[in-house]
Image (spheres, coloured by chain):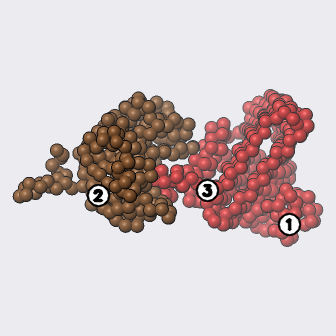
Amino acid sequence: MSLATALKTGDLAQLPSRRDEDWRWTDLRGLIRAIPSASGPLTPTPGGPFAALGGEEIVFANGLSGGREGALFTAEGDATLRLRFCSDARGTRHASTMVINAPGGERLTLLESYEGRGDYLADVDLSIEVESGSHVTRIVLVDEPAESVLVSTSHVRLQPGASFDQIVLSSGGRRQRIETRVAHPGQGASVRLDSVYILADQRHADLTTVVTHAGRDGTTSQLTKGVVRDQARGVFQGRIVVEKGADGTEARMGHHALILSDRAEVDAKPELLIFADDVQCAHGNTIGALDEAAIFYARQRGMPESVARAMLTEAFVGEVVDRIEHEGARDIARAWVSAQLGTAK
Amino acid sequence: MGPRDSREDDGEFGIIRVKSMLSITNLHATVGEKQILNGLTLEVPAGEVHAIMGPNGAGKSTLSYVLTGRPGYTVTEGSATLNGEDLLALEANERAAKGVFLSFQYPLEIPGVPALTFIRTALNAQRKARGEAEIAAPAFLKKARETAAALKIDFEMLKRALNVGFSGGEKKRMEIFQMAMLEPRFLILDETDSGLDIDALRIVSEGVNAMRSPDRGMLVITHYQRLLDYIKPDRVHVLSAGRIVASGGPELALQLEAEGYDKYAQVAA
């Protein structure tokens, strides 16, 4: 049951609905009344948010890359790939598949962007294989239009000794699900899954992750920060499964959201499913407002209230952005966050 | 005595009338339901340091919060002016731009905001409110380095998030650092000595004393007399149950240290 299946078969019953536990806050069945026709071709605008960082580029325009719905990339040496999902469509749908391999000992910086205009249904299915000794950094910037529906699902499989660092930054859409599922072998492999969501108006974003530790001595670190205002809706679902035998696992998950208006909402479901005996796992989840005492402190120093709030909100989100090790991507992420908060006031 | 330009010499009767910088008249204020200030009257001329001493619960911090415009504190009667201008009609940040600075008893930690960024944002906000140009980066950094050196603050600490992980003494020195950088006209020090050892007390006091000038006024709020050995006041007032119950010269502080606050608690009740 998935958007991808529904689009392929035309069967609306395949759409996930709020009755499915994993989709309770991201209902597609109630929203989508008919499967629209396929999107037409699109010549994408050159560039994208990561253009300045160079590397190779693969562009999906309305679901097609080089006329095909699927593409494959294998990293060699120290590689940078700008993977762009460009959409410009009205009342139609498209879907794409991408497979990425990082063979042993390679480094890959994956700069992934979702750039859209109009209103459409889009589905992206991504597989990432990270072999032993490889390091993949994935930075995802989701900048979709208010009326779009996007489901992007990534399946990441790591081998022992591999490392995978990810951050997703999203401003949401009509309904949006960015899901990452990681098969974690333990055995010295390390995973970081961070995210930032900044939502205004009636936008929705669902950041869902599932990490399954199958072997011992693996680490997972997750930090998500969200800011919602107006009537926006943020969803965080973070599940970490530590299977029997995966002793020595260290997993930490943090989700913290700021709600800036009465009608905005955040739903969070952190889950730790632990079946091993000797692990260190922790999760923290806070949803609230800015510290009023800190606002007064800043105002007493001369800052007007709006300036104080903007400074504190940017600092709140900044903690996640500061974890991006790639300097160029970090600067782009920071600028994007400032732009989102600027319009979000 | 004092600078001539802040006093009017009414020669005919030999009276010297002092024009106050901070003038508080019959101030009543509540925090939620509770009445804390009960008719507080106080005059602080420019160029002078006035100490406010009193037992816990007397209203010392409430006074500082009411003067600086903290939400949750309501003035129910009375007035407070700064250089003749109604202070209570202004927002907290507007009062800061007019030159009011509060050294907090419990300085806040601001995660994610480097101290230098915080102060520069504040300084530029004040300058903008006053119609002045923003401070240029080189000038700001130069001033920051000089001020940090004078207060024995490691400059590298200023690149870290403001007050995060700082000891109590370091936070109080950061308050004085901010004060020196913002160059306020009227300083309120709220129990600046609490949590300080002798060395920190000396450094903080030197920083405060370096700010003394004929056109600056200071209100030093303290429970203990010790701070006043380092920051010598011109006048000492006793605050009890929300009003000033006694005023005198510096010797009043020594008397309080010897005798305690009991007799003033009874006067106020």
Q: Which mark is residue A289?
A: 3
Q: Which residue is mark 1?
A: A29
The answer to whether marks 1 and 3 sit on the same chain is yes
Can you name the residue that lies furthest to the left here? B12
Q: Quadrant of residue A26?
A: bottom right
Q: Percent x, y for residue B15?
A: 12, 55
At a point 78% along the width and 50% down the height, the residue shown is A270
Q: Residues within 10 Å of mark 2 (few under 14, many from 20)?
A: many
Q: Quadrant of residue B92?
A: bottom left
- Against B173, is B19 above or below? below
Chain shown in brown: B
Residue B48 in view here: no
Q: Which residue is mark 2?
A: B23
Secondary structure of the residue carrying tag 2 is strand
Secondary structure of the residue carrying tag 3 is loop
Secondary structure of the residue carrying tag 1 is loop
At a point 41% along the width and 41% down the height, the residue shown is B192
- Give the CA distance from mark 1 to mark 2: 67 Å
